[in-house]
Amino acid sequence: MLLPSLGMERRDFMKAGAVAGALGGLAGCTGMLNDNSGGQTTNGAPDAHVPPGELDDYYAFLSGGHSGDIRVLGLPSMREIMKIPVFNHESARGYGYDDKSREMLEEAGGYTWGDTHHPRVSQTDNDYDGRWAFVNDKANGRMARIDLKYFETDAICNIPNQQGTHGACCVLPDTKYVIGVGEFRVPLENDGTHAADPDEYGSVFAAINPETMNVEWEVLVDGNMDNGDGGKEGKWFFTTGYNSEGGVTQAEMTRSDRDMVKAFNIPAIEAAVEAGNYETINEVPVVDGRQDSSLNQGDEPIVKYIPTPKSPHGVSVTPDNKYAIASGKLDPTATVIDIAALDEVDDPEEAIVGRPRLGMGPLHTAYDGRGHAYTTLFIDSQVVKWDIEAAVEADLNSEDPVVEKIDVHYNPGHLIASESYTADPEGDWLISLNKLSKDRFLPVGPMHPENDQLIYIGDDENGMELVKDKPSYAEPHDASIVQADKIEPASTYDPEDIDLEFTASGESSMERVADDRVEVKMYSMRNEFGFSEITVQEGDTVEMQVTNIEQTSDILHSLVIPEHDINIKMAPQETTKVTFEADEPGVYWMYCGFFCSALHLEMRSRLIVQPED
Ligand code: RUQ
Ligand code: CUA
């Protein structure tokens, strides 16, 4: 096949693409593999072009990585519809500027960013229920919840004893917990006293109540953890890990040839907590799940340590809940663990029933619901499709289960197929979230975008087909793809959902509530604010609450106050509040930042700060 090489000029690449397309045409349906001809639909993929005015079939929630947000794409168009700020500040939404989001971020540590990796949507009965999405913060040991009624972050949980929450996933079938998988080993009482003794470091597995967003309990384990995924029966939860050695340098972390997948027995852990078998550390019950813990010696160990080749990375459970599959990363295989067998075997290694040889750098695995697994090969820059049962039947390290490979551009991390994390994937679209884009887009300087590629996987006969490239801002990791009709977002706010007083039409008030404190409540509508001017005294604290009284969807207003770093947004029927100090005498034109009508520019009022006399 003709592939654009790195040294190739863009013009040459386009020519090559055209030739490849023509060859594909000449060869008919036989030239099915690895057709990277840049988007021509050659083997039966449904049209991924969603015409103007039409809606997509799926929502895709992609994490923004160190951008700290979540991006919402439509599939199959790959149009980016919305961004949901989570750990970052985002001025278009006033996120991090109004009192509520500012206080939430403040209570969650006061950081201005986070590192989102794994967005997972809540499920009921192993199917998406459209209620929430959750996402981790790898930079700070936190988990956030996004309310999918409003596509807004509504809670952030600070996870004690965890520095760097990496894996994130719900305990299924009904989202009993959201699990934060701790990556970095740190002293649990991290006050400097144990800094010199890495044997005292540990990483914990944290179970968070999705309603309250409180950490219910944690489990201390040996070694690092990495990614995680839950079985669909509510019992087993799997994490991968590296650094079983407990080292602190790269050489120490990679010394051994083996690492572990850990299988957490959730009911057994709950029973241990119930029985008081824990130590409270930083206000959280921590159960000892290390290998030599007494809780791991009996018939029902709370954590089973399953040996695998060095440094497995992704782990995901098959839709039928038969297997947990861990991708090898530093080893060219994936390890297939029989979940039911875990209950029967004495030696957890006996639950390993397959180990297909997939290629170089296997990282993550997704499913089509037809018995195939799709694994990214980071080093080979490919996605490999393989047959799960064939891998169970084949000898270990056999390549026979491999069905097909397709080139991606370049170096894929995660991949996700539509509804792959549920019991019933759709099996049509797959996104490969590639870490590098190199030559795929117009150059924009030394920092390149990432490349999220859409691949059609619905045609087993003719093979996978690369359909689209989409540049994305650094750096999407995992994603969840949800059928559009499973999510029902509100089009205006329900004032009942906001704990601020709704300022009904035509009412605005201003009151001095203390010597140096003024409370303003005003409405906003096309094309005015409730007050055309507001006068306060230098040194006043101003509590400014603004309601958008519009009933019409998509008519947003905002309140910008120059030289005060203030920008709050009000969607229809939303009330938003900001508190600030008026400490610089002068005149400030408060204006609306959304172009809401022909008189939008006139939608402004004066804030007058009178000097102290
Ligand atoms: S990780 S590229 Cu943060 Cu999910 Cu594997
Ligand atoms: Cu409201 Cu512009």
Image (cartoon, grey):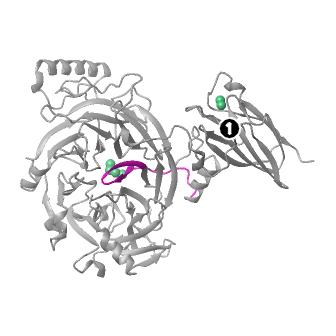
Q: Residue at x 11, y 25 (%)?
A: 29
Instruction: State left or right for residue 258 relative to residue 568.
Output: left
Instruction: State left or right for residue 390 relative to residue 408.
Output: left
Q: Residue 78, relative to residue 9: is it above or below?
A: below
Residue topped by disc 1? 559
Residue 191 lies in magenta, yes or no? no
Q: Nearer the viewer, residue 191 or 154?
A: 154
Residue 494 x %, y % = 57, 44
Q: Residue at x 33, y 58 (%)?
A: 226
Secondary structure beneath dot 1 equals strand
Instruction: State left or right for residue 415 relative to residue 386.
Output: right
Residue 406 appears in which quarter of the rendering? top left
Residue 32 appears in which quarter of the rendering? top left
Q: Quadrant of the N terminus?
A: top left
Residue 110 lies in magenta, yes or no? yes
Q: Which residues are magenta?
A: 109-131
Three-letter code for the amino acid on which mark 1 is drawn: Leu
Q: Residue 303, relative to residue 57: is it above or below?
A: below
Residue 441 x %, y % = 37, 28
The quadrant where ligand 2 appears is top right
Q: Residue at x 21, y 78 (%)?
A: 299
Residue 411 x %, y % = 29, 41
Residue 293 visible in the snapshot: no
Mark 1 crowd level (few <14, some 14–19, many ≥20, 10 Å Cα): many
